[in-house]
Amino acid sequence: MFTKLYAATWGDVGKAKEKGFFDFDLFSWMAWTWQTAAFFIFIALCITVMLIWEKKVPGGSPRKGILGLDTTRGDRLFVSLLGSAFIHLAWLGLVGSLLWIASIICVAYFIVVFKYV
Amino acid sequence: MNKTINQKAWYFVIPVFVLVAFNAAIPLMTVVNYSFQETFGNNVFAWEGTRWFKQILLSERFHASLGRQFAFTFIILLIQIPLGIAIALTMPKKGWGVPVCLILMSMPLLIPWNVVGAMWNIFALPDIGFLGHSLNAMGFDYNFTQQPGDAWFTTILMDVWHWTSLVVLLSYAGLNSIQPAYYQAAEIDGASRWATFRYIELPKMKKVLTLAILLRFMDSFMIYTEPFVLTGGGPGNTTAFLSIDLVKMALGQFDLGPAAAMSLIYFFIVLLVCWVFYNLMMKNEAQS
């Protein structure tokens, strides 16, 4: 049942695709893979955490960070995510392999942004 | 006094939420999915990991089109913003000249992109077009279909013709909102015309100018139809700006994976620029 969750490989090119359990016609055209699905679930989780955080500590804790900008929690999340995209891209372009190191840098970057920006 | 808290109005946001989901979020998710896979159609996809991103980031073709895009945007901003301010300063402030100028200024803005492209294409044709023929008759060796420099010149001229009015209208609105008292004070102090512009008009126009630069940046950064109709990205690839190159890759070559990766990188650049301008505008807002 889970085999069709994974992306096809080169051996499957040209073959008609078998309809798996998760292949709903409604969104099978979107070419989902578990990796990209995990990425979007991560984004959705981030937003959910922000919602819960806002309920617990309302107001978004605005402040003037080290960049001299007035930021709230949402701004910080945006800066973190966008910056992470650029860190990953830079790593891919400059180093090319071992992308997980870039991900670790991004975690550190997230922490720095949420603490100081 | 206790205010009743009623958040039901949020339900009115649902239609727009659904609309944005269907015309932005879902296509964007699909592009993300494409960017990690290879396909030959038929809805069969093979996982490729980050290969396309690496390929695009290292590809000379992408560097070239990104460079052309930045050069184009930079040049048109450099021309349109000062020119727009200059025109707005010379426009009449009252009388019959106001509606005439405003209507003349808004005319280019009302013309659809593809019509602008077609107009300028015919206008600039070296054998029959008024501009092209006149330039050649004056002794210039002008042919925008064969010489890259001429193609750039024509594309920039076309964009300046089409969009300077937007900067003019915004600057004009900014100028008109300045209270006469400021000018009277400047006159009493014996300020020169330049000083009046530098210390009264320019600071008062700061907000609208930030907006004008943002709008012009975004519009020129995603420019597609006008150069597509005018030059088709040619001669060669010399006017193939980012979006033209992207469409060539996605639809011309059917390289959906690399095209998706390229459009995501494009998207990140746009997001970054928007964020910078948003912060600039918020700063302006806080100051005033």
Image: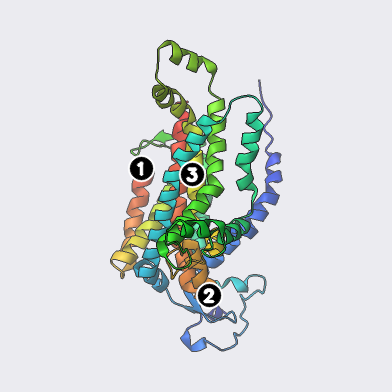
Packing grade of label 3 (10 A; few <14, some 14-19, many >=20) is some
Residue B217 percent across, percent down from the top left: 47, 48
Determine the image quadrant of residue B10: top right
Disc 3: host chain: B
Q: Secondary structure at mark 2?
A: helix
Position of residue A1 relative to residue B243, above or below, is below
Please report the residue visible at 34 percent of the width from the left and 41 percent of the height from the top: A116
Residue A115 shows which numbered tag?
A: 1
* Badge 3 vs badge 2, beta-carbon distance below 8 Å: no
Determine the image quadrant of residue B191: top left
Task: State which tag comes first along the sequence, 3 or 2.
Answer: 3
Packing grade of label 1 (10 A; few <14, some 14-19, many >=20) is few
What's the distance in space between the residues labelled 1 and 2, CA to CA? Answer: 47 Å
Q: Give, as a three-letter code, the residue at label 1.
A: Lys
Residue designated by label 2? B252
Q: Is residue B126 left or right of residue B195?
A: right
What's the distance in space between the residues labelled 3 and 2, CA to CA? Answer: 31 Å
Residue B186 percent across, percent down from the top left: 44, 15
- Tally of numbered tags: 3
Instruction: Point out the frontmost of discs 1 and 2.
Output: 2
Residue designated by label 3? B214
Question: Which quadrant of the figure contains the N terminus of chain B?
Answer: top right
Q: Secondary structure at mark 3?
A: helix
